[in-house]
Image: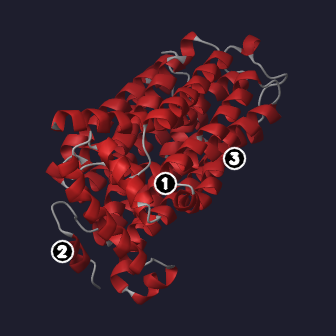
Amino acid sequence: MSQKINVFLYFSVVTVNLATMSMGGSYAWSSPAIPRLNGQIDPDHNPLPHNLTPTEESWLASLLPLGATISTIISGYLSDKIGRKYTILSSSLPTIIGFSFLTFGKDITHFLCGRFLCGLGCGPLFTIIPIYVGEVAESGNRGVLGCTMNFFMTLGNLVFLLIPPYINLRVLGAINLVIPIIFALIFGIFVPESPYYYAAKNQMCKAKKSLLKLRCNNSEIVKEELPIIARSVEESFAKKATFKDIYRDKVIMRAFGTALGLVFFQQWSGCNAVFFYMQTIFEEAEVSLSSDFCITIVAIVQFITSAIVLSVADRFGRRVLLLFSTSGHILNLIVIGTYFCLKDYTMVDVVRVNWILIVAINLFIASYSIGMGPITFTMIGELFPPHFKGFAATCSIFLCLFSTFSVTNLFPFLKNFLGTGMTCYLYGIICVFCYIFVYFKVPETRGKSLPEIQKMLLP
């Protein structure tokens, strides 16, 4: 019986994460697209009437996280009003329209609108999918299922960085267009609403029906779980989180500061700047391998390290991985920055040893994927009491997406003003402050209960 439960439960979680895979494709799109739209690669097949300007590049990359930032604000409200399922399902509409613009667009306005609409579709996914998965999962597999979002996001990155060398931008957009359509059909027809949502609306018959479907009609399990769900919902209504809680409770204040600090440094490490403009960076570096092949290597390395972190997070602890990750950022940003400074400002022929840059970028992305990327949000789920987790997650995701927008929008201007090398040094300096912050302010939460973590956060 447990196998039947797992089959449908995993089917439901995999189905909802088709949207996450589509989101990974949305994020990956700019890396192969920008050099094809600015004339660096295959200028004869540029769908635009002119090559992108630096300003257009920055907005094309950053409008997606800006759109996601805006839709994140209302996604929590929508999930309480229309449900987790329909909030997630509604995200497919702007994504489908957005990729229609990116597939059939003929001028820069179409592409900019497409990126913004894709961003609007990403916001609810960041916020609501973790909530939905956490609510439908069983206690024994909640940890594994909770990691699926990062896995499918990375899988989407991998797929949509592997295929661009073999197809044009319009075909790439069309493939991205198909996935949210498939997701909407399967998720809308077969996957049930969260029983927690029905319980919150005092619709216990629907909550029971949903839970029965998720547990393959095992009435004994449903009989045990349903009162737990009802009690959890009742407790959450009894104690609503507000901004006032941050000032009233010093433990929550410190936890909130730790969470926002981690999110800020996660984004300002420059990882998304490198990721969004990766192919442009490889083209500028004049690497001996094709830039398409280089980003394929990076995508594979990112996917492998994202899988590795699932097995090492509980073995080495959160702080160790964060410090290791930040150290990797600092060292590799120094290498990348030095390469470009020598190339741009000296007569040293660094292009002859361009393999060093390729290795450094791969190690930089790998160090992010094994530490600052996944562990930041793992800790957000561990630092706060249950009634404050949703509020803290929403604030953290808002800051994360707004910072992603800022970093990706500013990168072309920083690159033109400071040069790529000095921009990497700037990110490296920020990472030094990140290391200091983690070392002195971030507690180790591995294997700790919530009361133990709260005790560590006492001033």
Picture residue at 51% right of the left edge, 65% below the top: 395
Q: Position of residue 107 (x, y in %)?
A: 83, 28
Image quarter hosting the N terminus:
top left
Picture residue at 49% right of the left edge, 54% below the top: 127
Frontmost of labels 1 and 3 is 1
The residue beneath circle 3 is 413
The image quarter containing residue 308 is top left
Answer left or right for 197 relative to 63. Answer: left
Q: Residue furthest bottom?
A: 248
User: Dot 1: what SS?
Assistant: helix
Is 9 in front, or is 129?
9
The residue beneath circle 2 is 452
The residue beneath circle 1 is 127
Q: CA distance from mark 3 to mark 2?
A: 45 Å
Is 76 in front, or is 45?
76
Near mark 3 (Cα within 10 A), the count class, few <14, some 14-19 or many ≥20, is some
The image quarter containing residue 456 is bottom left
Q: Earlier in the sequence, mark 1 or mark 3?
A: 1
Q: Position of residue 314 (x, y in %)?
A: 18, 51
Near mark 1 (Cα within 10 A), the count class, few <14, some 14-19 or many ≥20, is many
Q: Where is 366 relative to 41, above or below?
A: below
Answer left or right for 389 relative to 97. Answer: left
